[in-house]
Image (cartoon, rainbow, N blue to C red):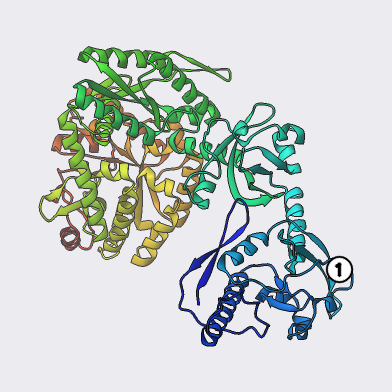
Amino acid sequence: MPQFRLKTSKTSKRCTVKRKPKPSRSGATGRKPSPCPKLPSRGIADRERAVADALAEARKSHERLREAIDILPQGIVFLDADGRYILWNKRYAEIYKASADLFKPGARMQDTIRVGVERGDYPEAIGREDEWIAERMRRLFHPGHSHEQFLADGRCIRIEERTTSDGGVIGLRVDITELKQREASFRLMFESNPVPMLVCSLADERIVAVNDAAVAHYGYSPSEFAALTIRRLQAFETDLPWGGDATDEERAARTWKHVRADGSLIDLAIYARQLNYQGEPAVLLALMDITERKRAEMRLAFMAHHDGLTGLPNRSLLRKRLDDMLSQTRRTGEKIAVLFVGVDHFKAVNDTLGHAVGDKLLRGIARRLRSTLREEDPLARLNSDEFAVVQTGIKRPEDVTLLAKRLLGAIAEPFLLEGHSVVAGASIGIAVAPVDGDDSEKLLMNADMALSRAKKDSRGSFSFFEPGMDARAQARRKIETELRTALRHEVLRPYYQPLIALADGGVTGCEALVRWPHPERGMISPAEFIPVAEDTGLINAIGAQVLRQACHDAARWPGDIRVAVNLSPLQFRVGNLMATVMDALKQSGLPARRLELEITETLLLEKSSQVIATLHALRALGVRISMDDFGTGYSSLSYLRSFPFDKIKIDQSFVRGVSDNREAQAIVRAIISLGMGLGVTITAEGVETEAELNWLRDEGCHEAQGFLFSAARPNDEIKGLLELQGDADGGEASCSARCA
């Protein structure tokens, strides 16, 4: 039996039936077949055969029509001239499920109609030809009229009756109750929706309907909207929100700019759906205002690539711009320079005047740098007190030097901030491409190394990158990597240098000095890795590891020999120094009175109240506190008043050659006299000659240490030496002038 596929036009909403070949099969409907056409006068057999063919064709037409209407969403029924059922679709049967008994042959539609029955004459038959069926299907959607109909269960539905124009009525009854409900729901959804919505005609793009939210959002009145097209609302776009081959998701992801009545622009995400509005093809637009979201996205994008304090580009954006500039210079052969500008002593400004003044100082420096540069020269802020400048169009090396001097001069001028005259200096490191690097990362790294050199050698000046800086930086990075490995495997060991009492030559204690035995490079000097440890923060782990090991070793020394351990200022900043010391004493079993902690004067410059409180707490444990390298730092006698030190150690720079140097003698003599007056033990470091030892003893110095007595030794050797000296002196641990 031939099959039909229903094809619906989106614009007209009319249905056509397209024939699709299918194997034929007969089927009876239980109804009287349509009258046959007049047949030629031939034999009875021919006449019967023709009648049979006509009946079969009528049945096929009937079945094809049933298949066509079964896929429609409306309820459809065909009646004969007496109003009896001929054919109905599945939807009609679903609607009338409460009175399905009416569908039996001979039942009349009139039995279900109680109000407003309007019906003309019905044709005697449905028809036999495919063209006839297709024509009837097209007429199903012609306008008609409607009335109420009651079902057997008392329900009332609205029925729409549609007619043909060939003199008869096809008894078509369509349930429009659901359609009416959908229309009401659409009105409610459209008019009361807080989301701005428009209905646009597909024919001429006119705006044929707007809801209250759209009127309020755009500022146009409904009459003004009626005079507009959707293109008139669009600021720049020439496309239509429903045009093109994009999917719904792709269209919704696009941002559209519309113009309000006051001329302001808004960003929108538009969702479009086609529909039939008042019998005409149209499109419904739901407009989601994403203006604030776009602004937030722009702010986030700006913050991701700019400094929040000064508004300058950050390192990430600078690197991107620098890569673009380097790509261009590879083609043109031009040179560019990167200048790292570091503000000198910026921390002192924060500490003395507060962070608010420090922030204003940075903004002021940024403005001065910008005013000194050309518009095409990028400026960025890299971190708290460092800026970067990229100089383009370099013709000769003097161009970079002149710019560096101008930048230093601009920053050197005093700043008036909150009533304070603030003078800020700066140092500059310079790297020039392509000589010092042909990619942004390499160039920035080399400029940073040059800045470190400038700060170290002479603040307030500039320094160009040199290849040797990279070699030193590579060596420094290698030390850091290997030092982390050594800490993880506890390779570092304390070596001990004896402290000798000058009165009787006895050993009073030993100072623990960290040593790094490297498997390939041998013993690495502390002067090589301690600065790296302090810069990287590894000094905290080193200090804790040395303290634990020193306490463990000293607990097994003979007598009451003390062990002295140096503390770094960074260990005080961590905040767990007390717990570290208590844990080391507890785990080793060393009495607190045998532990001596050495600090430097520079420690007292930072957060002195916190440092003094920590020192008092350590002193309360019974630990002795010693001031190391006295006289070399920011010496102040107020330190000796703020905390009662147990020992003062004279730096070796004053001890070396003291027997022949009158200036050094005056300084050392003053320190010894001060210690005696305060009741503090005085220890001289770096004693290397007998003359130095004799002079110190004559002046009343209490202790001395240095190569004259012994170099730093591993624990096994120092323990054997202490036991040997104890046996030689009858149990008194002493040293007869030399232990080396």
Front residue of 521 and 64:
64
Q: Secondary structure at mark 1?
A: loop
Which residue bears the numbered disc 1?
117
Residue 368 quadrant: top left
User: Taking 704 as reference, is 718 above or below it?
Assistant: below
Front residue of 677 and 591:
591
Rendering coords of residue 6 (x, y %): 56, 65
Rendering coords of residue 582 (x, y %): 42, 60
Rendering coords of residue 689 (x, y %): 14, 37
**In the visual, does 463 lie left or right of 23?**
left
Query: Looking at the image, which residue is at 68% across and 76% down?
Result: 87
Front residue of 694 and 640:
640
- Under mark 1, the amino acid is Val
Query: Looking at the image, which residue is at 28% across and 39% down?
Result: 701
**In the visual, does 68 lie left or right of 575?**
right
**In the visual, does 179 lie left or right of 376?**
right
Task: Find the residue positioned furthest to the right.
Answer: 115
Residue 169 quadrant: bottom right
User: Taking 237 as reference, is 482 above or below it?
Assistant: below
Query: Looking at the image, which residue is at 59% across and 48% down?
Result: 271
